[in-house]
Amino acid sequence: MKISKKLIPYKALADMIADSFGKKCEVIIHDLSTPQSSVVYVVNGHITGREVGQSFDHLVKQVLLSKNFKDDYNANYTFKTEKGKKIKSSTSLIRDENEQVIGAFCINFEIEELLKMKKFLNEFFQEGEPVDNVENGIQIEPFDNVIQVIDNIIDKTIGDTDLNDLKKKDSIRMLTFMYNKGIFLAKGSVDKVAEKLGISRVTVYSYLDEIKKNIKEQ
């Protein structure tokens, strides 16, 4: 996947950080103009298994909707990979010359071995508080700049879809993607998606109930 010209300068920064901190440090560049395949550059992808062409995982749930998100970044939140490795992560938004959010820059550091030295590295291992709304499905009111990012993700996800010939399966496919990425944790997102798809909010809630049921049955 070709990286956009505006994000190319961040490749050298990603390489430098990865070289500085070694093979336990993964750096990822996301292009948010293509949310469903946002990963455009990865260094040390063996840490989480991330590959170019994949989508973001934690951007909405643990960054944009975190109370620790400020000045366009959230630092030192943690998560576990599918293999159980504990990762310390920091993510910053990337803006263009018009102050529009175009991407995200993520640093993931595997800390399993460092945990053994935690008593010597307390400052390094300060962790942000967990995002309770993510676990409980509670919607929160995002900040204005976060609203812009989430609106942009909704727009890019719907893309050039022909709404005049929109089938239920197509709507569910897009809603499933947005649900899994945490879009509906932001207040007002259901109304926005309903308006953009030209369907009622009742229909959106109905589709979301179906999506949740399918996920539980898997």
Image (spheres, grey):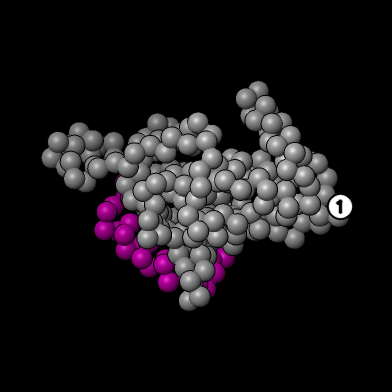
How far from the left and from the top, in percent, is residue 102? 52, 65
Q: Residue furthest bottom?
A: 97
Of residues 122 and 150, the one drawn nearer to the viewer in this rendering: 150
SS at mark 1? Answer: helix
Dot 1 amino acid type: Asp
Assess whether residue 114 is covered by the magenta stretch: no
Q: Is residue 97 left or right of residue 217?
A: left
How far from the left and from the top, in percent, is residue 32? 55, 59
Image quarter of the C terminus: top right
The relative height of residue 2 versus residue 110 in the rendered view (above or below) is: below
How far from the left and from the top, in percent, is residue 54? 56, 50
The relative height of residue 18 versus residue 215 in the rendered view (above or below) is: below
Q: Is residue 107 left or right of residue 126?
A: right
Is residue 50 visible in the rendered image? The answer is no
Magenta part of the protein: which range?
A: 1-25
Query: What residue do we see at 48% from left, 71% from top?
Result: 99
Query: What residue do we see at 39% from left, 46% from top?
Result: 67
